[in-house]
C-alpha cells in the first residue's frame, strides 16, 4: 500500500518588526523562489502571495517533512536569497515565529482565493488584525505581546 496524504497548510509570517521591506515590483521573483523551496521539500504549492510586510503560503505538507523544518527552510533560504539578490535592499529578515493553519479539502478553493486576493484584502484589514483573527478563528490561544 502506498502512502497518501491530504495535509493543507496556510503558513503566514511577517518581516522582522513588520517592516514594509518586500518590494512589490519583485514579489513574483520571490514567490517563484519560494515555489522552488516548496518543491524541494516534496510539497505542492497551491498559492503564495502577500504584501510589503508579510506573506501567505498555501501548500500541502509531505509526510516525510516536519512543519517546523519546512517553515525554517523557507524562511532561511528565502532570507538569504532576498539579501543576495539586491532586489530587497531594506529587507532585514523574517520575524521569528509563524502561524500555520490546517484546512480540509472543502476549504481548499476558498483559501486559494483568500491568499490570491491579499493585496485587495489588506486595503481593509491590517496584518496585525488579520493574524489575530486567524489565530482566533482557529481556536489558538496567544499572548498579544508576541503579536506586536
Image (cartoon, rainbow, N blue to C red):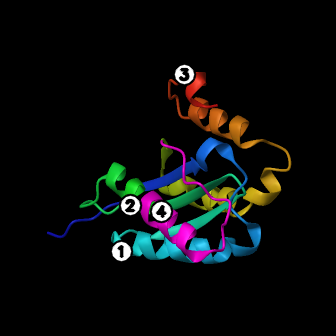
Q: Which residues are magenta?
A: 75-96
Which of 19/122 is in front?
19
> SS class of the residue under badge 3?
loop
Residue drawn at 48 percent across, 66 percent down:
80
* Other-residue count near label 1 (Cα within 10 Å), few / some / many at <14 / 14–19 / ≥20: few
Q: CA distance from mark 4 to mark 3?
A: 27 Å
Labelled pair 1, 2 in contact (Cβ < 8 Å): yes
Query: Depth-wise, is mark 4 or mark 3 nearer the camera?
Result: 3
Query: Which of disc 4 and disc 2 is earlier in sequence?
Result: 4
Q: How many marks?
A: 4
Which residue position holds label 2?
Answer: 73
Q: Image check: 20 left or right of 135?
A: right
Above-or-below relation of 88 to 85: above
> SS class of the residue under badge 4?
strand
Say whether residue 118 is magenta. no
Say whether residue 95 is magenta. yes
* Other-residue count near label 2 (Cα within 10 Å), few / some / many at <14 / 14–19 / ≥20: some
Q: CA distance from mark 1 to mark 2?
A: 10 Å
Query: Depth-wise, is mark 1 or mark 2 nearer the camera?
Result: 2
Which residue position holds label 3?
Answer: 143
Query: Which of disc 2 and disc 1 is earlier in sequence?
Result: 1
Q: CA distance from mark 4 to mark 1?
A: 13 Å
Q: Which mark is residue 40?
A: 1
Residue drawn at 40 percent across, 75 percent down:
39
Residue drawn at 32 percent across, 63 percent down:
62
Amino acid at each position: 500500500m502506498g502512502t497518501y496524504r491530504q495535509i493543507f497548510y496556510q503558513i503566514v509570517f511577517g518581516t522582522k518588526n513588520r517592516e514594509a521591506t518586500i518590494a512589490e515590483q519583485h514579489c513574483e521573483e520571490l514567490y517563484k523562489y519560494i515555489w522552488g523551496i516548496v518543491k524541494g521539500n516534496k510539497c505542492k504549492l497551491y498559492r503564495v502571495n502577500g504584501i510589503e510586510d508579510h506573506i501567505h503560503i498555501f501548500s500541502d505538507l509531505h509526510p516525510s517533512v516536519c512543519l517546523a523544518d519546512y517553515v525554517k527552510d523557507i524562511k532561511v533560504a528565502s532570507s538569504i536569497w532576498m539579501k543576495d539578490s539586491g532586489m530587497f535592499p531594506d529587507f532585514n529578515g523574517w520575524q521569528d515565529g509563524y502561524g500555520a493553519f490546517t484546512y480540509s479539502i472543502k476549504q481548499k478553493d476558498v483559501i486559494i482565493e483568500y491568499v490570491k486576493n491579499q493585496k485587495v484584502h489588506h486595503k481593509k484589514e491590517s496584518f496585525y488584525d488579520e493574524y489575530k483573527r486567524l489565530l482566533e478563528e482557529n481556536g489558538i490561544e496567544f499572548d498579544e505581546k508576541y503579536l506586536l
